[in-house]
Amino acid sequence: MKNVHIQFSLPVSILKEGDTFVAYTPALDLSTAGETFEETQKNFAEAVNIFFGELVEMGTVDEVLIGLGWQKQNNTFVPPTVVANQTKSFSIPLAN
């Protein structure tokens, strides 16, 4: 069987939670973490490869990606587009 490679771009947010960095993409609802920014980027790339490897192995690429909001265009998948990434302030009353 011939290896086929696809290329795509994913929106990725990297957050710092205490001493840990967390990478998350809403396009796959996938996250990973690391102790450094660089380690987190490496771990994220590995997680994406594992994610797609599992989809291919299980034969569920179309089903899962469409379920995550991807569009199939000309036999190629396009991930959902992030239209905003904002920080919002909220004021919520708490009981005393």
Image: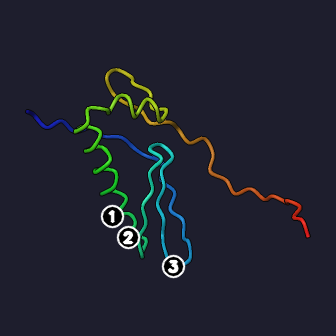
Badge 1: residue crowd in 10 Å (few <14, some 14–19, many ≥20) = some
* Above or below for 9 versus 60: below
Question: For this view, does 40 lie left or right of residue 60?
Answer: right
| Residue 36 appears left or right of 47 | right
CB of mark 2 within 8 Å of CB of mark 1? yes
Q: Position of residue 32 (x, y in %)?
A: 42, 61
How has the structure been colored for display?
rainbow
Q: Quadrant of residue 31?
A: bottom left
Amino acid type for the residue under numbered disc 3? Asp
Q: Which residue is mark 2?
A: 38
Q: Amino acid at mark 1?
A: Lys
Q: CA distance from mark 3 to mark 1?
A: 17 Å
Q: Earlier in the sequence, mark 2 or mark 3?
A: 3
What is the x, y in percent for residue 66?
A: 43, 29
x, y (%) of residue 17? 56, 72
SS for dot 2? helix
| Residue extending farthest top | 74
Dot label at residue 61: none
Task: Name the residue that disc number 1 marks.
Answer: 42
In the picture, measured across the screen, residue 37 lies left or right of residue 82, that is left
Q: Quadrant of the N terminus?
A: top left
* Dot placed on the residue nearer the N-terminal end, 3 or 1: 3
- The residue at the point 31 percent across, 23 percent down is 75
Mark 2–mark 3 distance (CA, rounded to whole Å): 14 Å
Residue at numbered disc 3: 19
- Judge the density around disc 3: few (<14), some (14-19), many (≥20) Cα neighbours within 10 Å: few
What residue is at 35 percent from the left and 28 percent from the top? 62
- Image quadrant in which the C terminus is located: bottom right
